[in-house]
Image (cartoon, rainbow, N blue to C red):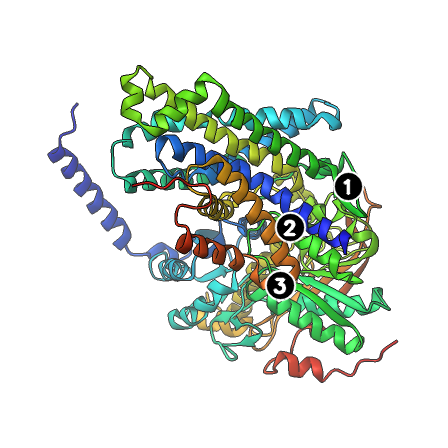
Amino acid sequence: MIQQVVGVVMSGVFHASILFLVSAGLQVVFGVQKIFNLACGSFYALGAYVGVSAVGWYAAAGGPPALFIVPLAVAGLAAGGVGLVVERGLLRFVYDRDETFQLLLTFAVVLMMEDAIRMTWGTSPRSTSGLYLVYGGVSVLGTTVPVYNLIVIGASLAIALVIGWLLTRTAFGRIIRATADNREMAEALGVDVRRVFAGVFTLGTALGTLGGALVIPATAAMSEMGIELIVEAFAVVVIGGLGSMRGAFVGALSVGILRAIAISVYPKLEMLLIYLIVIAVLVLRPRGLFGEARA
Amino acid sequence: MRTTRRSFLRLASTGAAVATVRLDGPPARAQAGGPVKVGVLTIRAGIAAPVGAAGLRGTEWWVDRVNRAGGILGRTVQLVVEEESNPKDTVERYRKLVLQDKVQAVLGGISTGVTLALGPVAEDLATPWLSWDGTTQKGVEETMPHPTWAFKSVDNEVEAIVAGMLTAKYFKGIKTVAGIGNDYSYGHDCWESYKAVLKKYAPDVRFVLELFPKLGVTDFTSHIAAIQQSKADLLMCSFWSGDATIIMKQATAVGLFKTMKGVFTTAGGVHDSLKKEFTPEGLLLGYNTMYFDDPKGSALLKQFVREYKARHGEYPPYECDHAYFCAESYKAAVEKAAAQSGKWPEKAAVARALEGIEVESLSGRRSWREDHVQMCAFYQGITTHRNPYDFATISPVEVVSTKVAMKPAGTKLFDWINSWKVSRG
């Protein structure tokens, strides 16, 4: 029994940790820029492909397999640079427009990225072959858990802490929070909102690309992998509350673990359960668990 | 020079006029001794894009080979390639191939969701359509039992039936089985057929878990936890795309196959991604209708595998063989019909000549049954690491003909399976 619980919880937490990174990217962008970034799933897919390539080059250059996570994480973070291009090149033109324009624009980015990925990496799924098994597995109360999964969970937790520290304890965090609260006031006080927006969007993108890169050893990169995740990230955001980092954390954990429990107990409920909870939250507490009430 | 709106419009209208003239021009050359146009429909995007690419590559290899040898009755073959996407758009492109491009036949069609819609259109447009991998079955029921122009692929569930037979042979004594497949017709039909067949051989076997994640899911860790929990003796999986590789990797990482047997009915479609590091020996693995490393393979297969590897950097999957067979049987039918009439045959004569025709394909002899369904053999076997590749292959190789593993024309699948007389060893 304990074995089963551990198996289900660990698989759920692994899924949650990737989901958290992507949703955190979504949240930080929405919180500050008030843009609901549909492209967060595409950034996740991009990170996965860049990660596969980086690990491929690393292996070809003869790097020790045990350290593959270093080039993987670096590539994932570096791919976040595309966020700067998207923000400066596209998004900044629609800040003052209706939200519909912003949604449509980020949706356009989703479609363009999918094609760009296909043109660059082809249509076949790409994987990092057996690197996932390099670290082996450990037995947790009788259940084998891949060490790599633990590394990803640890990395995700560490990133959550770093973001928390960044937002609450640093000057950059104070500026971000001030801009999120009241953009005009922040601007009047001398905050360069352009730079803040560029920085925040790049940070949000990097969280997504890093999530994609970290997940890739355990799975395979497919050009439509982002779409699947956007849907779950939505659920996370609704449950946790739009714009809240704590909401992303709790929401991701809830979605990950509940999905795992549903699959074990009554598999037909796999996604339905998540949607039922989303509906319940929307009806009973529309702002989500940690969302702020707005007039 | 500055392009004003007016001059641009003038330019555009001239261009349109030129285009119209070209489209309306008489296809006189095609009717005379010019190249023979053959349409191809193939998937270019999404999860099945690699399958589509393999089918197109197989067809192109065939075209090069035929044209080098002088074409069909002296006419070279020219392909007109269109994309297979959703049923509605694909039907439009099919119409375009026949009505506008004036192709002599259409090859291709992979997803049964699409080909189910193509079947009646093919009948309507009176041009031979030879489907690579798509059927006109709704679930496991045939919707077009007596077509004139539509030539359809093997029934989708055959590989699960073969796997059921071989499970009984190789994994004697299993008591409980868990299943996982994609949540659409193919996944469900394979699971139901597999269960029915296995029950015939091992009536006591219990099916303890069935999981149907959506097509496109890339994380199966929670599904694997549920499979472990079921404590089944054997896992049956009908994944055929990148998800087969993913579940193999994630299952091996938690040691699933240390305690459980595995049957992967269709994962041979992505065979070279099943690396030895995470694909254990001793699983039953299906390669559909062509096994690239068949020790008894023909000289044609060996040449194809060699040239495919040299050109595309990978080893060919089964879709190449479906595609090659469709093209080669078309050529044989044209030649057969022409032998009777002495001139380039009408489309109707070609369609009649296709019925029952048998040709050498990459995997061996293949034919069209009288009700226009492909007849061929399925290749499955037990995974091994004893090969020169970095991925798993199979040994021994079991070859099972559709004569024994596909429901005969006009029968219902489960009635047919239930009528089997099986000796239980």
From the viewer's perspective, is the residue at label 2 or at label 3 nearer?
3
Percent position of residue A70, x then y: 66, 24
Q: Nearer the viewer, residue A121 or A35?
A: A35
Residue bearing the label numbered 3: A266
Q: The N terminus of chain B lies in which quarter of the figure? A: top left
In the image, are marks 1 and 3 on the same chain? no
Q: Residue B195 falls in which quadrant of the image? A: bottom right
Q: Nearer the viewer, residue B365 or B319?
A: B319
B19 sits left or right of A281 in the view: left
Question: Nearer the N terminus, badge 2 or badge 1?
Answer: 2
Q: Amino acid at mark 1?
A: Glu
Q: Judging from the image, what secondary structure is the residue with disc 1 in?
A: loop
The residue most toward the top is A190
From the viewer's perspective, is the residue at label 2 or at label 1 nearer?
2
Note whether residue A123 is visible. Answer: no
Q: Residue A215 falls in which quadrant of the image? A: top right
Residue bearing the label numbered 1: B277
Circle 2: is it few (<14), some (14-19), or many (20+) Cα within 10 Å? Answer: many
Q: Residue at x 16, y 24 (%)?
A: B2
B111 sits left or right of B362 in the view: left
Percent position of residue B285, x then y: 74, 57
Percent position of residue A244, x then y: 45, 37
From the viewer's perspective, is the residue at label 1 or at label 3 nearer?
3
Q: Amino acid at mark 3?
A: Tyr
Q: Residue at x 72, y 55 (%)?
A: B291
Q: Which mark is residue B220?
A: 2
In the image, are marks 2 and 3 on the same chain? no
Distance, label 2 to label 3, CA atoms, is: 16 Å
Q: Amino acid at mark 2?
A: Phe
Q: The C terminus of chain B lies in which quarter of the figure? A: bottom right
| Chain of the residue that carries numbered disc 2 in the rendered image | B
